[in-house]
């Protein structure tokens, strides 16, 4: 079997050595004229950047929903007895609200009222002196 394969390859290289070296297989017809190659079909692929953007958008939506749920619960807690809430709880509440407004501004924009709240939170949450 290997002798037959070696003889066949030898005969092919003798008939058309350029085609053999270029990796082309001879056609079934006896003509040695080369036919133009058709380029492979191009497939569209999504770039890594757009995939990351899609993942980021999904994460933003999930995070906004999470913050909305916490905002509703925390508002009830603060409205019930605001004096009993610790300073850390109030600060976390403000930070969550600030994050929600920042994400919303990236996603769909803020209304004037929301922007005013965003600016107040920004000033209130500014760098703390240690």
Image: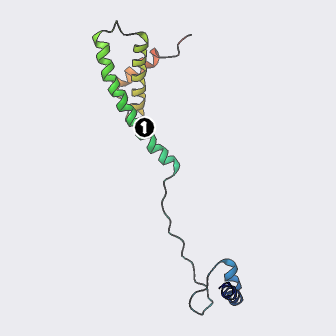
Q: Nearer the viewer, residue 76 or 1?
A: 1
Percent of width and height locating residue 34: 61, 85
Residue 84 to residue 74: above or below: above
Question: How many marks overall?
Answer: 1
Whether residue 28 is visible here, answered yes or no, is yes
Query: Could you say where residue 6 lies in the image, as x and y percent from the top left?
Result: 69, 85
Q: Which residue is label 1 attached to? A: 59
Asked if residue 119 lies left or right of residue 75, the reply is right
Residue 107: tell me if it is visible: no
Residue 47, above or below 111: below
Q: Residue furthest bottom?
A: 30
**Residue at figure coordinates x 33%, y 19% from the top left:** 74
* Secondary structure beneath label 1: helix
* Rendered position, 15 above or below 55: below
Q: Name the residue rendered at 45%, 19% in the picture.
A: 122
Q: What's the coloring here?
A: rainbow
The quadrant in which the C terminus is found is top right
Q: Residue furthest front?
A: 1
* Quadrant of res 9: bottom right
**How far from the left and from the top, in percent, is residue 49?**
51, 47
The residue sitting at 48% across, 60% down in the picture is: 44
Horizontally, residue 128 falls left or right of residue 104, namely right
Which residue lies at the image location 65% right of the left edge and 77% below the top edge? Answer: 23
Crowd class of label 1 (few under 14; some 14 to 19; many from 20; radius 10 Å):
few
State which quadrant residue 27 falls in.
bottom right
Locate the N terminus and report the quarter of the image it occupies. Answer: bottom right
Q: Nearer the viewer, residue 7 or 108?
A: 7
């Amino acid at each position: 079997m290997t002798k037959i394969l070696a003889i066949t390859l030898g005969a092919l290289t003798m008939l058309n050595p350029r085609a053999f070296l270029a990796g082309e297989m001879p056609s079934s017809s006896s003509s040695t004229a080369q036919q133009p190659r058709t380029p492979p079909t191009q497939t569209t692929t999504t770039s890594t950047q757009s995939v990351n953007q899609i993942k980021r958008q999904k994460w933003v939506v999930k995070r906004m929903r999470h913050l909305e749920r916490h905002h509703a619960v925390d508002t009830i807690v603060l409205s019930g007895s605001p004096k009993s809430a610790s300073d850390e709880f109030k600060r976390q509440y403000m930070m969550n609200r600030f994050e929600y407004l920042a994400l919303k501004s990236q996603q769909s924009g803020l209304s004037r009222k929301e922007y005013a709240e965003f600016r107040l939170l920004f000033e209130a949450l500014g760098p703390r002196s240690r």
